[in-house]
Image: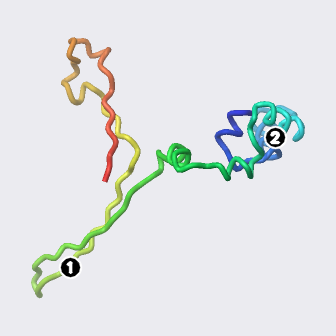
C-alpha cells in the first residue's frame, strides 16, 4: 500500500483502496488506508502532489522523455534553391549495450560473464 501511494502521488485513499480491492482482492476500508499512510508519515494525495520536485518528476518520467528540434537545410534543386525543414526526436532514456558488442565478448580479465553492461545516456 505504501509503495502504491509513493508511486502514484495523485491517488487518494479511495483510489488506493479500490486498487487493492480490484487488483489484489484485499477488502480494506478507506480509513484504514488513511491510518496506515499516516503512520508511515505519507501525506494525503493533494499534499504529496504539491511537494513534487523536478528531480522526482524526471525520475518518474525518464523512460518517456524525448527531446525534439528542427532545422532548415537549403539545397539546390531543378528550379532553384529549395529549403527543407528537418524535424527530429531523440529519446533521453539510457541505451544499454551488452559488453560483448563493444569488446568482442571479452572483458579485460578475459571472462565475458563478469563484464558489465555499458550504459550511456543520449544527450542533445
Give the spatial CA distance, label 2 vs label 1. Answer: 57 Å
Q: Is residue 80 left or right of residue 91?
A: left
Q: Quadrant of the N terminus?
A: top right
Q: Position of residue 26 (x, y in %)?
A: 83, 32
Mark drawn on residue 91: none
Mark drawn on residue 83: 1
Of the image marks 2 and 1, the number of the one nearer the N terminus: 2
Which residue does the image show at 64% across and 40% down from the upper left? 7
**In front: 53, or 118?**
53
Q: Quadrant of the C terminus?
A: bottom left
Vertical placement of residue 84 versus 31, above or below: below
Q: Quadrant of residue 28?
A: top right
Local SS, label 1: strand
Q: Position of residue 47 (x, y in %)?
A: 73, 49
- Asked whether disc 2 touches disc 1, contact meaning CB atoms under 8 Å apart, the reply is no
Mark drawn on residue 17: 2
Local SS, label 2: helix
Q: Quadrant of residue 97?
A: top left
Q: Position of residue 117 (x, y in %)?
A: 33, 27
Vertical placement of residue 117 versus 77, above or below: above
Q: Position of residue 50 (x, y in %)?
A: 67, 53
Circle 2 packing at 10 Å, graded few (<14), some (14-19), many (20+), is many
Q: How is the image coloured?
A: rainbow
Circle 1 packing at 10 Å, graded few (<14), some (14-19), many (20+), is few
Amino acid at each position: 500500500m505504501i509503495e502504491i501511494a509513493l508511486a502514484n502521488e495523485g491517488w487518494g485513499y479511495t483510489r488506493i483502496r479500490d486498487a487493492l480491492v480490484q487488483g489484489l482482492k484485499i477488502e480494506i476500508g478507506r480509513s484504514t488506508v488513511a491510518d496506515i499512510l499516516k503512520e508511515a508519515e505519507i501525506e494525503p494525495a493533494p499534499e504529496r502532489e504539491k511537494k513534487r520536485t523536478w528531480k522526482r518528476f524526471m525520475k518518474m518520467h525518464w523512460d518517456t522523455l524525448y527531446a525534439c528540434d528542427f532545422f532548415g537545410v537549403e539545397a539546390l534543386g531543378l528550379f532553384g534553391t529549395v529549403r527543407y525543414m528537418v524535424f527530429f526526436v531523440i529519446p533521453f532514456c539510457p541505451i544499454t549495450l551488452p559488453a560483448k558488442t563493444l569488446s568482442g565478448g571479452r572483458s579485460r580479465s578475459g571472462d565475458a560473464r563478469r563484464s558489465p553492461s555499458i550504459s550511456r545516456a543520449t544527450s542533445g
